[in-house]
Image: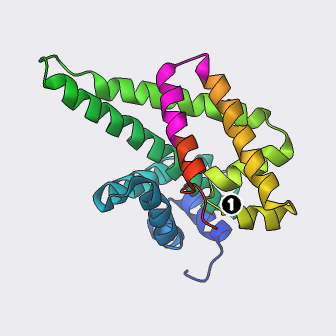
């Protein structure tokens, strides 16, 4: 079974609920996903928890995976949004700890986290779908597949500066879209933008 392609393994997972096939499939990308998550979270325990959530989500949504040849892209995208969820929760926890030093109130943050994260994911997906073909491919390669600027430039025949400019424009579009909807979405997106600006969003 280890010699089967991703498409063949996913077929077994979707048609026969084959857990062994799923384990073999995700094991191929386990290390790469962990590195992707850890680079953004910088916590071993949190990275392991996020990775586990991504794999569980992948199993629960196995029937919705349409392109078996791009299973790694699907996992990276799931990891990308799981990291956003973590960032929202993490910053809320820090803010909440400060508030609790001043007054004692019932906490509703977990529910708020889920609503805001879900809303943000939907808006980002919508805006990405509206991008032209080149911008969409470059953005997805950078943000969801964690490819370096050099890799993206070589893949699409662009200069590295063009790739950087394209990512910046894509982030600006998303930021402007979110800016009219929710202040916290803007705050989290700015965190992602800072990753791009300081170089942590891509490795050259």
Q: Is residue 108 left or right of residue 86?
A: left
Magenta region's main secondary structure? helix
**Is 181 one of the magenta-colored residues?**
yes
**Is 117 one of the magenta-colored residues?**
no
Q: Residue at x 34, y 25 (%)?
A: 111
Q: Which residues are magenta?
A: 179-191
Q: Is residue 69 left or right of residue 75?
A: right
Q: Is residue 67 left or right of residue 122?
A: right
Up-down: is 60 above or below 146?
Answer: above
Nearer to the camera, 22 or 105: 105
What is the secondary structure assignment of the residue under circle 1? helix
Q: How many circles with numbers are drawn on the protein?
A: 1
| Quadrant holding the C terminus | bottom right
Nearer to the camera, 89 or 23: 89
Nearer to the camera, 148 or 44: 148
| Quadrant holding the N terminus | bottom right
**Residue to which mark 1 is pinned:** 70
> Quadrant location of residue 15?
bottom right
């Amino acid at each position: 079974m280890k010699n089967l392609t991703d498409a063949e393994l996913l077929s077994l997972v979707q048609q026969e609920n084959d857990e062994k096939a799923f384990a073999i499939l995700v094991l191929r990308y386990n290390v790469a996903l962990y590195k992707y998550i850890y680079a953004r979270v910088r916590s071993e325990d949190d990275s392991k928890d996020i990775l586990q959530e991504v794999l569980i989500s992948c199993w629960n949504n196995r029937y919705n995976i349409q392109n078996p040849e791009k299973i790694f892209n699907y996992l990276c995208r799931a990891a990308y949004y799981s990291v956003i969820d973590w960032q929202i929760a993490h910053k809320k926890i820090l803010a909440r700890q400060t508030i609790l030093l001043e007054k004692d109130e019932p906490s509703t943050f977990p529910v708020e986290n889920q609503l805001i994260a879900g809303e943000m994911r939907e808006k980002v997906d919508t805006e990405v779908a509206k991008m032209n073909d080149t911008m969409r491919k470059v953005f997805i390669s950078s943000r969801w597949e964690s490819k370096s600027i050099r890799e993206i430039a070589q893949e699409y025949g662009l200069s590295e500066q063009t790739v950087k400019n394209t990512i910046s424009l894509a982030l600006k579009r998303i930021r402007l879209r979110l800016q009219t909807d929710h202040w916290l979405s803007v705050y989290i997106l700015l965190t992602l933008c800072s990753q791009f600006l300081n170089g942590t969003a891509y490795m050259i």
